[in-house]
Image: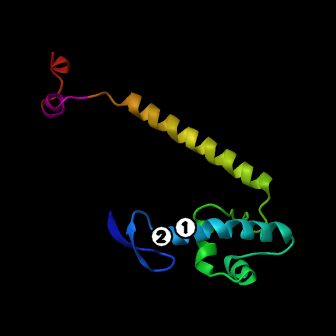
């Protein structure tokens, strides 16, 4: 184990990871209160700063909850779930067409040995 600086509280601790055990415990205790606050106020627009101010906690802890995936972010402004699913379908179709093009290009190329590449194919000379 090595000496590491916690990215939230900036204290040195002996261990692995980027967050010290005390901050990890604080995040576990903070998550239910953040979740409840967001559920109790569904009509308000939130960002990390407003949630941190409302709960009177350091903004770094709320940001870390978002970074770790505990809190999901909204869709971009004006984007409905239907539009998002259409974009995902389009991206999947594009990816499939790229995979098909790669497969066709791999079939079109004939494997060549170094000798054939440098000196040519002897069967063509006869």
Quarter of the figure with the C terminus: top left
Which residue is the site of mark 1? 24
- Please state the horizontal and vertical placement of residue 52, each as a whole percent of the image: 69, 80
Residue drawn at x 87%, y 71% as measured from the top left: 43
- Residue 40: assigned label: none
- Residue 20: assigned label: 2
**Which secondary structure dominates the residues rendered in magenta?**
helix
Instruction: Name the one closer to the observer, 32 or 66.
Output: 32
Residue 15 lies in quadrant: bottom left
Residue 108 placement, left or right of 29? left
Q: Which residues are magenta?
A: 112-118
In this rendering, the answer to whether 26 lies above or below 92 is below
How many angstroms separate mark 1 from mark 2 (CA)?
A: 6 Å
In this orientation, does residue 1 appear?
Answer: yes
In this rendering, the answer to whether 101 lies above or below 48 is above
Residue drawn at x 54%, y 72% as measured from the top left: 23
Quarter of the figure with the N terminus: bottom left
Residue 48 lies in quadrant: bottom right
Check the image and tell me how it is coloured. rainbow
Residue 63 on the magenta segment: no
């Amino acid at each position: 184990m090595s000496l590491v600086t916690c990215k939230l509280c900036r204290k040195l601790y002996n261990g692995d990871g980027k967050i010290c055990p005390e901050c990890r415990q604080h995040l576990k205790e903070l998550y239910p209160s953040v979740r409840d606050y967001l559920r109790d106020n569904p009509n308000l627009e939130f960002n990390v700063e407003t949630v941190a101010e409302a709960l009177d906690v350091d903004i770094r802890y709320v940001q870390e909850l978002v970074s770790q995936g505990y809190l999901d972010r909204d869709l971009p402004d004006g984007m409905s779930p239907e539009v998002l699913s259409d974009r995902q379908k389009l991206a999947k179709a594009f990816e499939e067409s790229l995979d098909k093009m790669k497969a066709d290009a791999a079939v079109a190329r004939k494997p060549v040995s170094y000798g054939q590449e440098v000196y040519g194919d002897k069967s063509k000379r006869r």
